[in-house]
Image: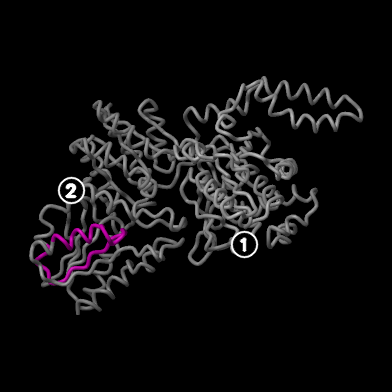
């Protein structure tokens, strides 16, 4: 599509050269460009469509990088990237050597901080604002935070420490959504602020009266702006944010770019921390995304005019998990499902529809999710906590103290385990095998749907205490599907005559190990291949079995230090094995946004690299 106004902007300073009347058509150009671009590359759509006018208004008034824009979560930053000279790179959004889907200071000086996880922006902005004070620097620190992030506790830790920072601005982008619809008391509180009829009735009556007064009306409108806070205190008595030390402003129409720019201009000379409450519509301007913003939060490529937002998502480990959990819940009324603002992402929408009384979306609060599950388990329930691996990290302390110490009967369902495409460094599921094994949590890693359902039944109906089932993003591969499920803790999935070399792996990485094994055998290098289903504790008998080989290569989509491969090497050493051992794992210094096959190639975890490693080190 043609974008004549957007094409004039190569730096935020160019935005300031436009006439005020050009701001609205600019926003429409951006909306059309994002819809067309993201439909081709995939990415975060609905959140970005809802933040266009807000971002344009901010860049119209502020001056980055002197002023720091801290996005929470960073996936609403696409307009910011367009206005800071990165339009020509959107064709490679979230692709290898392309544009990151999140703010990243390594990509642009206009990006204040990397932001892939939620409810961090206020703490970051407070730190930046305080640093500016200490260094006597000009500029503001502005946190742009969605109302969904207010379901996470770190927000309130930050709000409790704003002091009297007159260079701090918190902008609440209130669209009534996180990734799934917001839940809890905070959502109800913001809804009350946004929709209280008393306030809006008074406001409408006063404005109507002023409109009827010739000549005097405009000056009185200016006076009305200064009266807003007084009116709000009169009607609401106060707001939580004012009690914490903010000057509260809002609710403000988040899609009126002219009024937003004017508001931000008026607030340039602030005398206290500002809290600006902006109301937006997630998915604004694209009806399917407005109708179902959860489905359009993160999308693969699609046809804008042909996608049905109500269509069932493609088959995946997440949907297989969610559907089978419903079947198990029919048999046992103690089973409960818990997630943290990721109902659709974790496949729990099915459980929610079938068993709403046993479904709990706690908001963006992973720590609470785990401890809440411990409380349920302590009273005889069977809670299943479904989280992405990258978000599970936030609850590590709770896993140790509230679940593990008392051996509470909690099942962790770890989605997006292993390497994850598109989102880059912030969303990789490469740490959970290491940190769960350190504290002794029994962990299973199925490679296909059959093994997933087996593990779920085993862990829910036969196992007790803390345990985890981890599974990758997306659908099962055709190769691993053929392996079916034996129910064994480990299997030899490829056997060669007189093999002295063994390749060992688990989860989705099993496919690369198996393909490498086949390639080597075709080249006359006899190798066997083993797949682990239970990864911690190590499968019974596997160390003794593998000690029969002279050379072992262990491959995993996990960090090397503390990973399962390191545990395996230690056990071999303890059994006086003196063969040659190679541990192939994830090099975190090379993480980037790319497809999983590309990431595996970079990490030398692809089949060709594993085979080459064997030939180089074991020949």
Is residue 141 magenta-colored?
no
Q: Secondary structure at mark 2?
A: loop
Q: Position of residue 579 (x, y in %)?
A: 13, 71
Q: Which residue is mark 1?
A: 86
Q: Which mark is residue 585?
A: none
| Residue at the spot 46% in from the left edge and 38% down from the top edge | 157
Q: Which residues are magenta?
A: 546-571
Q: Is residue 5 visible?
A: yes
**CA–CA distance in space, label 2 to label 1:** 51 Å
Nearer the observer, 16 or 456: 16
Nearer the observer, 190 or 343: 190
| Residue at the spot 47% in from the left edge and 45% down from the top edge | 118
Q: In the rendered view, how is the structure colored?
A: one colour
| Residue at the spot 18% in from the left edge and 37% down from the top edge | 462
Tell me where residue 561 sits by quadrant: bottom left
Nearer the observer, 260 or 240: 240
Q: Is 521 above or below relative to 326?
A: below
Q: Secondary structure at mark 1?
A: loop
Say which label, 2 or 1, has the lower sequence index: 1
Left or right of 444 in this view: 89 = right
Q: Position of residue 315 (x, y in %)?
A: 39, 47
Task: For marks 2 and 1, give the one nearer the viewer.
Answer: 1
Is residue 570 magenta-colored?
yes
Q: Is residue 2 visible?
A: no
Neighbor class of circle 1 (other Cα within 10 Å; few <14, some 14-19, many 20+) is some
- Which residue of the protein is positioned furthest toward the right in this rendering? 215
Q: How many marks?
A: 2
Image quadrant for the N terminus?
bottom right
Q: Which residue is mark 2?
A: 487
Neighbor class of circle 2 (other Cα within 10 Å; few <14, some 14-19, many 20+) is few
Left or right of 340 in this view: 186 = right
């Amino acid at each position: 599509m043609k974008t004549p106004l957007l094409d004039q902007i190569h730096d935020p300073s160019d935005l300031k050269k436009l006439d005020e009347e050009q701001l609205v058509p600019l926003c429409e150009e951006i909306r059309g460009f994002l819809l067309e671009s993201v439909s081709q590359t995939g990415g975060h759509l609905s959140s970005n469509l809802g933040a266009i006018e807000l971002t344009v208004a901010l860049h119209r008034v502020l001056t980055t990088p002197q002023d720091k824009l801290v996005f929470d979560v960073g996936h609403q930053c696409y307009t910011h990237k367009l206005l800071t000279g990165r339009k020509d790179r959107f064709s490679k959004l979230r692709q290898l050597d392309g544009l990151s889907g999140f703010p990243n200071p390594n990509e642009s000086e206009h990006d204040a901080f990397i932001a892939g996880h939620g409810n961090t922006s206020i703490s970051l902005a407070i730190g930046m604002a305080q640093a500016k004070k200490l260094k006597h620097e000009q500029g503001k620190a502005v946190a742009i935070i969605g109302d969904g992030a207010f379901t996470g506790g770190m927000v309130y830790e930050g709000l409790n420490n704003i002091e009297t920072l007159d260079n701090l601005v918190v902008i609440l982008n209130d669209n009534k959504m996180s990734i799934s619809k917001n839940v809890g008391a905070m959502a109800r509180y913001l809804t009350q602020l946004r929709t209280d009829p008393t306030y809006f009735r008074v406001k409408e009556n006063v404005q109507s009266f002023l409109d009827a007064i010739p000549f005097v009306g405009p000056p009185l409108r200016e006076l009305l702006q200064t009266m807003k806070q007084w009116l709000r205190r009169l009607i609401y008595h106060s707001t939580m944010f004012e009690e914490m030390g903010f000057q509260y402003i809002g609710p403000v129409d988040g899609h009126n770019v002219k009024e937003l720019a004017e508001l931000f201009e008026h607030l340039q000379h602030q005398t206290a921390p500002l809290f600006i409450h902006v109301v937006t519509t997630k998915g604004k301007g694209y009806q399917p995304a407005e109708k179902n913003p959860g489905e359009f939060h993160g999308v693969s490529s699609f046809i804008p005019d042909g996608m049905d937002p109500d269509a069932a998502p493609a088959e995946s480990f997440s949907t297989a998990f969610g559907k089978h959990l419903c079947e198990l819940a029919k048999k046992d009324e103690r089973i409960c499902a818990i997630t943290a603002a990721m109902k659709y992402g974790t496949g729990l929408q099915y459980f929610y529809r079938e068993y709403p009384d046993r479904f709990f979306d706690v908001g963006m609060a992973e720590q609470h999710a785990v401890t809440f599950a411990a409380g349920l388990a302590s009273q005889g329930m069977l809670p299943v906590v479904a989280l992405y691996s990258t978000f599970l990290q936030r609850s590590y302390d709770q896993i140790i103290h509230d679940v593990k110490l008392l051996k509470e009967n909690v099942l962790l369902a770890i989605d997006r385990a292993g390497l994850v495409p598109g989102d880059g460094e912030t969303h990789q599921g490469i740490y959970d095998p290491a940190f769960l094994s350190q504290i002794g949590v029994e962990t299973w890693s199925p490679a296909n749907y059959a093994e997933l359902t087996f593990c779920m039944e085993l862990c829910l109906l036969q196992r007790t205490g803390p345990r985890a089932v981890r599974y990758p993003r997306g659908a099962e591969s055709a190769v691993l599907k053929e392996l079916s499920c034996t129910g064994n803790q480990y299997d030899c999935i490829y056997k060669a005559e007189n093999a002295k070399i063994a390749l060992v792996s688990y989860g989705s990485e099993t496919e690369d190990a198996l393909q490498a094994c086949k390639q080597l055998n075709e080249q006359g290098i006899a190798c066997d291949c083993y797949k682990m289903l239970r990864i911690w504790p190590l499968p019974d008998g596997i160390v003794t079995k593998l000690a029969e080989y002279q050379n072992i290569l262990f491959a995993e989509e996990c960090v090397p230090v503390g990973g399962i491969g390191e545990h395996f090497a230690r056990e071999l050493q303890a059994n006086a094995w003196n063969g040659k051992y190679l541990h192939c794992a994830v090099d975190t210094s090379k993480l980037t946004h790319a497809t999983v096959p590309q990431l595996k190639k970079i990490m030398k975890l692809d089949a060709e690299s594993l085979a080459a490693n064997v030939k180089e080190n074991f020949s």
